[in-house]
Amino acid sequence: MPGSTHDDPLPDCHPSAGPRILPASAPSGFVSLVGAGPGCPDLITLRGLKSLAAAEVVLYDALLDPSFTEYFPQQALALSVGKRGGQAQVEQSDIHRLMIDHARGGRRVVRLKGGDPLVFGRGGEEARALEAAGISFEVIPGVSALQAAAAGAGFPLTHREVSRRITILEGHHLPDTAAAWRDLAASGGTMAVYMGTRTLQALSRSLLEHGAPPTLPVALVERAQSPGQTSTFSTLGHAAAGALRPTTPGPGLFFIGEALNHRFHPTLEIPHEPLAPVSGSAREARARGGRRERRAS
């Protein structure tokens, strides 16, 4: 464009409707529900980073990389409200209360959530709670673990003539009818199972019992896009037999589908530039590394 340079600031591209404008009598605080991405700081969006830099209160999930906290403004109140299976956790109602109370106190709040707020992130619940309380808010999307895991492990989620759909499941709540399992087994495409490391064997057995082929490729991706990422490839038959098991205590996604046969292998990891300075001091994200790949059979 005429007159533009590489030094021009990036434009703000908020939807034309913008955040809801409340009456003058409404609280002056504001809440941003921000998707932090899979856990590595350099995968947060620019809009999310700008919102974080302006925060007075940060309510953050159990982010995978502790270096994320280095990007919190030094003057901000930072509270961990993350959840991890089998561990003490903050109740969802308490998270709602913290957001609302701080916003009513006139503060700018960032609710920093792993992945994308609206994909198994309870972002919808939090948005509804804010709306019911009359709090002005926005939702800033993030890179979901679904995309991050596939990109990090080197396989497409869709592939022409092989996978034209993606089915997303939650491992804690699997189908409970034979008809639902038959539909899944015959659906084709790619299945992605969040929170499925504990149920992957039972899920694989059910798919086999309802018609899925034992040769169907599967992958378990743990700690996606973070130091220590592990990708384990196998088949549905081997997974049903118990040969595919988690290798880390971190979160994992289980993938099933023919698209996994169309893998790619990046040959060069390009160094990432440090994120923009926050609160006047440049801090560099830890480099991703130590990725491992194995085959279970």
Image (tube, rainbow, N blue to C red):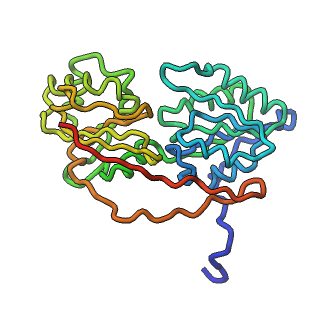
**Residue plotted at (19% across, 53% down):** 161
Q: Return the x and y of residue 141 as percentages of the image width and height.
A: 55, 45
Task: Residue lying at the far bottom in this picture: please name it.
Answer: 2
Q: Quadrant of residue 273?
A: bottom right
Residue 57 percent location from the top left of the image: 75, 37
Classify residue 214 by image quadrant: top left
Residue 289 percent location from the top left of the image: 45, 52
Q: Camera-side residue: 245 or 189?
A: 245
For this view, does 95 lie left or right of residue 63?
right
The residue under the point 32% across, 41% down is 166
Please tell me whether residue 31 is drawn above or below residue 263 in the rendered image.
above
Q: Position of residue 294 (x, y in %)?
A: 27, 44
Tell me the quarter of the image containing the C terminus: top left
Number of labels in the image equals 0
**Which residue lies at the image location 59% right of the left edge and 54% below the top edge?**
285
Q: Residue at x 55, y 43 (%)?
A: 65
Is residue 277 toward the left or the right of residue 75 in the image? Answer: left
- Residue 243 vs residue 194: left or right? left
Residue found at the very far right of the displayed protein: 25
On the image, which quarter does residue 268 sit in? bottom left
Q: Quadrant of the N terminus?
A: bottom right
Q: Above or below — where is 253 with respect to 211?
A: below
